């Protein structure tokens, strides 16, 4: 019995170690940086300690890559100040801004220069806490060579062509409301619950993702006097077949309003556990795609002054 138990422990450790390792192409240095851009290599040397923890890296509060053990990602950016952060979820909740456990740090980058941002996992053996630090170029060049390329987090909404707008001034987003939603979870096939991260309500989570996407599209500012209001008419999930349905009405305090309804389809799987996992994983992509539909809507473009 002891012999079998030892085999089980070794197998479990092996599986966790494999799950926490990057599997992309081996590091290849970039020889030419695009004009008026800086290059930040975000990398994480392969270590056993904390290897089961994959976490998100944020630049100016937008997620850019999920940093796996032994992985790297080349991040191009315009010159200026950059704020980086790391976290286990792909959104930054406002409460995180005052959380001492959530590290934010800023450094300035110059066009044509290369920088190295090293990720580690503090404390714990298999599970730790995400940590980032800027390292000297000589250190980064040496440590990154054994890392493998990671895929960045693709944006769903793209910046609108400013030349096509009458006014390119950004907007702000009011608190999202709903009639009778008042729920923080959906029961999936009686097998378990799907809920937003960090104890957020669906209204709060949808607003966070909308702000993130509008910021990525150069269309958002907290201080903008032009406030868009959103109200949830319908939010539902189905696993036979798999789909998230989001329907919202938007207005700016004037009689001119518009509504957007979007259905995001996904493969739910046969078992209840697989359905729960799929529904949870597809919630954020569903919201991102929904925001893309909002940006393309004529009513939104009228609000921008197009």
Image (cartoon, rainbow, N blue to C red):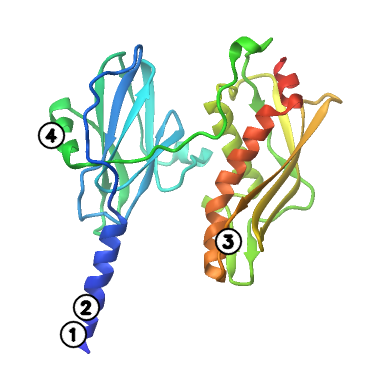
* Residue that extends furthest to the right in the rendered view of this protein: 255
**Label 2 sits on residue:** 7
Q: Residue at x 75, y 48 (%)?
A: 234
At label 4, counting other C-alpha atoms closer than 10 Å, the crowd grade (few under 14, some 14-19, many 20 or more) is few
Q: In the figure, is residue 16 to the left or right of 161?
A: left
- Is label 3 or label 1 in front? 3
Marks 1 and 2: CB-CB under 8 Å?
yes
Q: CA distance from mark 3 to mark 1?
A: 39 Å
Residue 128 located left or right of residue 2: right
Q: Earlier in the sequence, mark 3 or mark 2?
A: 2
Query: Which residue is rendered at x = 43% and y = 41% of the image?
Result: 99
Relative vertical location of residue 54 with respect to residue 18 in this rendering, above or below: above
Q: CA distance from mark 3 to mark 4?
A: 43 Å
> Which quadrant is the C terminus positioned in?
top right
Give the number of the disc on residue 191.
none
Q: Secondary structure at mark 4?
A: helix
Tell me whether circle 3 and circle 2 mark residues in contact (CB < 8 Å): no
Query: Could you say where residue 103 lies in the image, as x and y percent from the top left?
Result: 36, 37
Crowd tier of the residue under label 1, counting other residues whose Cα lies within 10 Å: few below 14, some 14–19, many 20 or above: few
Residue 61 at x, y = what percent? 46, 32
Q: Position of residue 225 (x, y in %)?
A: 68, 19
Q: Which residue is mark 3?
A: 268
């Amino acid at each position: 019995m002891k012999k079998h138990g030892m085999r089980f422990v070794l197998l479990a450790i092996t599986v966790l170690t494999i799950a926490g390792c990057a599997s992309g192409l081996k590091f290849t240095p970039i020889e030419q940086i695009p004009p008026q851009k800086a290059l930040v290599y975000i990398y994480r040397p392969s270590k056993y300690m904390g290897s089961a923890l994959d976490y998100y890296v944020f630049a100016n509060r937008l997620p850019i890559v999920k940093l796996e053990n032994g992985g790297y990602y080349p991040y191009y950016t315009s010159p200026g100040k950059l704020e980086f952060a790391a976290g286990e979820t792909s959104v930054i909740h406002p409460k995180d801004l005052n959380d001492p456990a959530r590290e934010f740090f800023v450094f300035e980058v110059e066009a044509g220069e290369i920088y190295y941002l090293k990720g580690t996992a503090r404390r714990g053996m298999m599970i730790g806490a995400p940590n980032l630090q800027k390292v000297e170029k000589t250190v980064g060049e040496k440590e990154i060579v054994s890392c493998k390329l990671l895929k960045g987090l693709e944006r769903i909404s793209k910046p609108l062509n400013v030349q096509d707008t009458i006014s390119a001034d950004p907007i702000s987003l009011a608190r999202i409301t709903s009639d009778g939603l008042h729920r923080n979870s959906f029961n999936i096939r009686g097998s378990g619950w799907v809920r937003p991260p960090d104890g957020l309500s669906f209204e709060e989570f949808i607003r966070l993702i909308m702000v993130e996407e509008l910021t990525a599209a150069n269309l958002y500012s907290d201080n903008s006097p032009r406030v868009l209001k959103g109200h949830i008419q319908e939010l539902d999930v189905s696993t036979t077949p798999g789909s998230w349905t989001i329907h919202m009405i938007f207005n700016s305090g004037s009689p001119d309003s518009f509504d957007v309804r979007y259905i995001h389809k996904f493969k739910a799987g046969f078992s209840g556990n697989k359905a729960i996992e799929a529904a949870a994983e597809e919630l954020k992509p569903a919201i991102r795609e929904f925001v893309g539909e909002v940006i393309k809507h004529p009513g939104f473009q009228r609000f921008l002054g197009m």
